[in-house]
Image (spheres, helix red, strand yellow):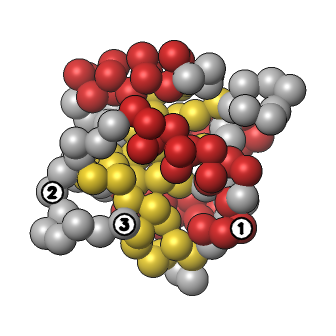
Amino acid sequence: MSRLNPATILVVDDEDGMRTLLRHQLSDLGYVVVEAGHGLGALHLVRMQPSKFDLVISDVVMPLMNGIELAATLRDEYPELPVILISAYTPTALTRVGIDHAVVPVVMKPYTRDELAELIELTLESPAVLS
């Protein structure tokens, strides 16, 4: 990673086990991880400290506010904050979703740590490529 400080990633998933797995994977890669159990909780955290987060990684299917709704809201309020979506439930093997003239990458479960790491680095180094 070319940053002086490790990036802070907000992980959003309603499944405790998935959040724990992501936390361990991302911590092992050197990132600081903050967790939220649903989209509304994540939105609250970002609104409280918008400059704290470098990236949001969110599951697509969640109660209260799904990942696509979260990504769209974040895109409206914080257009510079990149989002990566993770899903096991999309009908086809999506690799990205268009949200308000932006492209949000989608990682399909199951994924490897290396696949996720590569996408995170690309997103953090060149978020404009994905928007």
Residue 10 in the image: above or below residue 83: above
Q: Nearer the viewer, mark 3 or mark 2?
A: 3
In the visual, does 127 lie left or right of 14?
Answer: right
Q: Secondary structure at mark 1?
A: helix
**Which residue, given by chain and number where applicable, does mark 2 sit on?**
89
The alpha-carbon separation of the residues under discs 1 and 3 comes to: 17 Å
Q: Quadrant of residue 22?
A: top left
Count residues near mark 2 (Cα–Cα under 10 Å), then give few for <14, some for 14-19, many for 20+: few
The picture places residue 9, in percent across and down from the top left corner, at 58, 34
Mark on residue 7? none
- Towards the viewer: 12 or 117: 117
Q: Residue at x 27, y 53 (%)?
A: 108
Residue under pointer 1: 128
Q: Quadrant of residue 82?
A: bottom right
Q: Quadrant of the N terminus?
A: top right
Q: Which residue sits at x=22%, y=30%?
A: 15
Residue 45 position, x and y percent, is 57, 35
Q: Are marks 3 and 2 in contact (CB under 8 Å)?
A: no
Q: Residue furthest right?
A: 4
Tell me which amino acid carries mark 1.
Ala
Q: Mark 2: which secondary structure?
A: loop
The quarter of the picture where the C terminus appears is: bottom right
Q: Amino acid at mark 2?
A: Tyr
State the residue position of label 3: 95
Secondary structure at badge 3 equals loop
Q: Residue at x 72, y 58 (%)?
A: 126
**Number of marks in picture:** 3
Q: Position of residue 18 (x, y in %)?
A: 27, 28
Apparent side of residue 70 relative to residue 1 in the rendered image (left or right):
left
Q: Earlier in the sequence, mark 1 or mark 2?
A: 2
Q: Which circle's residue, 3 or 2, is located before the other in the chain?
A: 2
